[in-house]
Amino acid sequence: KLAGALGLCLLALLGLSVAVRTDPPIPRLSIVGAALISFLGIYNWRLVLSRIIRHPALAARLRRRVVVIGGGMQAMRIQKALGENGDMEFVGWVQAIKPNGVAELERHRLGPLHELEDILRRNAVNIAILTESESLQREGVAFVAGACEKEHVQFKMVPHFFEILISGI
């Protein structure tokens, strides 16, 4: 793929040097050399950058950290989906109003909803997902949105009719 692109560009540069007369004439060998050095430099830069990004310590810092507001099966589904995703990391969940119905999630509990700002700050969260939108009143949703805005955290909300969509009805 890269060799094909390099060959095409070299052919285009040589064709351009034949079609356009310059004064003094530019040797074709210098055009080929400059193009070859440019492509090798870009290829090597990409190789070095990919090695740097794949370093475990840096890769962990580049992952977006996600917290789920509300427990239950939706939080469990999100945790499992994020386990398969290398770009995001499940930090834990915050208890809104409903008690958690899944025992596996209990060890990932970060605290109650009224401590949300502190939880977001302490865990360096990038994304907050609200799954209990139907149990919170309008003021509760506004509190969550305000806390996320204050801490510069991306706020996403799963609508309560989402369970109908995933059940296949």
Image (cartoon, rainbow, N blue to C red):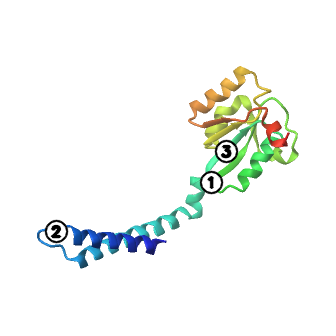
Q: Is residue 114 left or right of residue 151?
A: right
Q: Which mark is residue 21?
A: 2
Question: Which of the marked residues, 1 or 3, is nearer the chain's N terminus?
Answer: 3
Indicate which disc residue 87 carries. 1
Query: Relative to 140, does residue 51 appear above or below in the rendering?
Result: below
2 vs 1, front mark: 2
The residue at the far front in this view is 19
Residue 48 placement, left or right of 122: left
Q: Residue at x 22, y 69 (%)?
A: 19
Residue depth check, mark 2 versus mark 3: number of the one nearer the observer: 2
Quadrant of residue 116 within the rendered picture: top right
Q: Amino acid at mark 1?
A: Asp
Residue 71: horizontal and vertical position, in percent? 80, 38
Instruction: Say which of 119 and 63 sits in front.
Output: 63
Give the number of the mark in front: 1 or 3.
1
Element carrying mark 2: loop
Type of the residue with mark 3? Val
Q: Which residue is mark 3?
A: 66
Please, is residue 48 above or below residue 100 in the view?
A: below
Number of the label disc, if any, that sits on residue 72? none
Give SS at disc 3.
strand
Residue, x 84% and y 43% (percent of image)? 168
Label 3: how many residues lie within 10 Å, few (<14), some (14-19) or many (20+)? Answer: many
Q: Residue at x 68, y 55 (%)?
A: 85
3D distance between C-alphas at marks 2 and 1: 51 Å
What is the x, y in percent for residue 110? 74, 40
